[in-house]
Image (tube, helix red, strand yellow):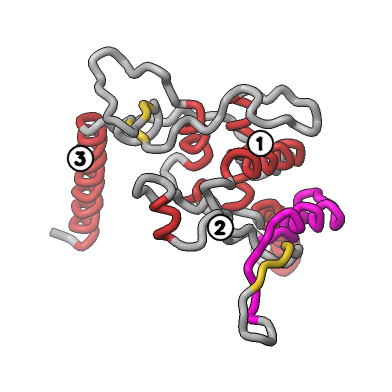
Amino acid sequence: MSGEGAMTRRIVTGLAATILLAMGLATTAQATGGSSVDERHWGFQGIFGTYDRGALRRGLQVYQGVCASCHGLKYIAFRNLQDVGFTEDEVKAIAVDYSLQDGPDDAGDMFERPGKPSDRFPSPFANENAARASNGGALPPDLSLIVKAREGGADYVYGVLTGYHDEPPEGVVVPEGMTYNDTFPGHMIGMPAPLFDGSVDYEDGTEATVEQMAADVTTFLAWSASPEMEQRKRMGIKVILFLIVLSGLLYAVKRKVWADVH
């Protein structure tokens, strides 16, 4: 068999194996209670997508008012908020509301101080053991990268936040300490429903429905996972435009150089 024929055979075999593996995974997910994630349109998706500044502000309110009691945001500094429209004074006001441990001082003791813009959002717990002790043995994940860390991304986070049911489907038994959720893998989640209509009082007057709050905090968490996204997209567009212009110039030069060659 020729080298080209052997290569073609390997490609076809590989594709077939990939398809069979995907089918097997899908079947396994269905058998073990895997959940599908409904797709939503997000303004930050696509090559020209950007973060909705209003949603980011509201999402920060939801995070602070609902999520921050259990979940940290350790990779985001307060001053990063200036990149998405918060003023320097607003960032200082947000930071000073937090109390952070610092030190040691001249006497060798640790002390508490108000937050500064250069500080990162602190964890609500002193350590992992304290976090587990406060949550029945479960460790609440840090939310800095949650949108990147979960398959389905923003759709998954939104789906979990809006997928709670007071009553499970007929025939489904929910273990003690668990709650039924449409989106969470296996449908049993240890975190009670965090959002209820009116959980926060939006500063801009937006009605705080569960769906609205879920969309806003998901947008905020998408930003926390990729705060450089808008800059990256702007640079990508500039590079594409440069390459288009360069290609045109090179084509024009080629036509000029080879004009007299027949």
| Secondary structure of residue under mark 2 | loop
Q: Which mark is residue 123?
A: 2
Task: Tell me whether circle 2 and circle 3 mark residues in contact (CB < 8 Å).
Answer: no
User: In this rendering, which labeled residue sits more in front, label 1 or label 3?
Assistant: 1
Residue density around tag 2, few if under 14, some if 14–19, many if 20 or more, within 10 Å:
some
Mark 3 — residue?
20
Q: Is residue 259 visible?
A: no
User: Is 28 included in the stretch rendered in magenta?
Assistant: no
Q: Which mark is residue 43?
A: 1
Q: Position of residue 32 (x, y in %)?
A: 22, 33
The residue that appears at 36% across and 26% down in the rendered structure is 180
228 relative to 22, above or below = below
Task: Give 159 or 131, whichever is nearer the viewer.
Answer: 131
Q: Position of residue 14 (x, y in %)?
A: 22, 50
33 relative to 111, above or below = above
Q: Which mark is residue 255?
A: none
Mark 1 is on which residue type?
A: Gly
Task: Give 237 or 258, whichever is nearer the viewer.
Answer: 237
Task: Answer with the quarter of the image where residue 60 lies.
Answer: top right
Quarter in which the C terminus is drawn: bottom right
Task: Tell me whether circle 1 and circle 3 mark residues in contact (CB < 8 Å).
Answer: no
The residue that appears at 76% across and 37% down in the rendered structure is 54
Give the magenta part as a residue range: 77-104
Q: Hey, which residue is sitting farthest left in the picture?
A: 1
193 relative to 114, above or below = above
Q: Earlier in the sequence, mark 1 or mark 3?
A: 3
User: Is 99 included in the stretch rendered in magenta?
Assistant: yes
